[in-house]
Image (spheres, rainbow, N blue to C red):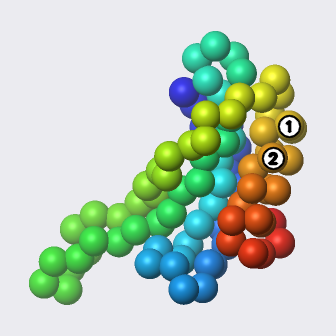
Amino acid sequence: MQVVKELEIVEIPDAIHPRRRMVLIQRGDGFYAYAEQYYYTSRYDGAIIAEGWAWLPTDGSIYENPQAAEAEARREFSGRHGVAY
């Protein structure tokens, strides 16, 4: 699995981790999928001990090309979060 494109970051109000984005993935079989990611920061005693992008589970859909995966990722993100994407 390899990330082939990171879509723009969007702030989602009322989310525990408001910074979100979708990524397009090329699977080992050559097909494509998408996944949502959120940005996290972990702190201990005021110091950042870890930060980065974490993956949410995908719905298992696969696409023949990255354009189809991106179109569906944008549609799904918009519907899920009520924002234009």
Residue at 83 percent across and 72 percent down: it is 84
Q: Is residue 12 above or below residue 36?
A: below
Q: Which mark is residue 68?
A: 1
Q: Is residue 11 above or below residue 50?
A: below
Residue at 69 percent across and 65 percent down: it is 80
**In this rendering, position of residue 11 left or right of residue 77:** left
Residue matched to label 2: 72
Q: CA distance from mark 1 to mark 2?
A: 6 Å
Residue sticking out furthest to the left: 45
Residue sticking out furthest to the top: 29
* Residue 8 rendering spot, x and y as whole percentages: 71, 63
Q: Is residue 66 above or below residue 9?
A: above
Q: What type is the residue that disc 2 sits on?
A: Glu
**In what quadrant of the picture does the N terminus appear?**
top right
Find out whether the residues at labels 1 and 2 contact each other: C-beta distance under 8 Å: yes
- Say which of 80 and 3 sits in front: 80
Q: Is residue 8 visible?
A: no
Q: Residues within 10 Å of mark 2 (few under 14, many from 20)?
A: some
Element class at badge 2: helix
- Say which of 56 and 40 sits in front: 56
Q: Which mark is residue 39?
A: none
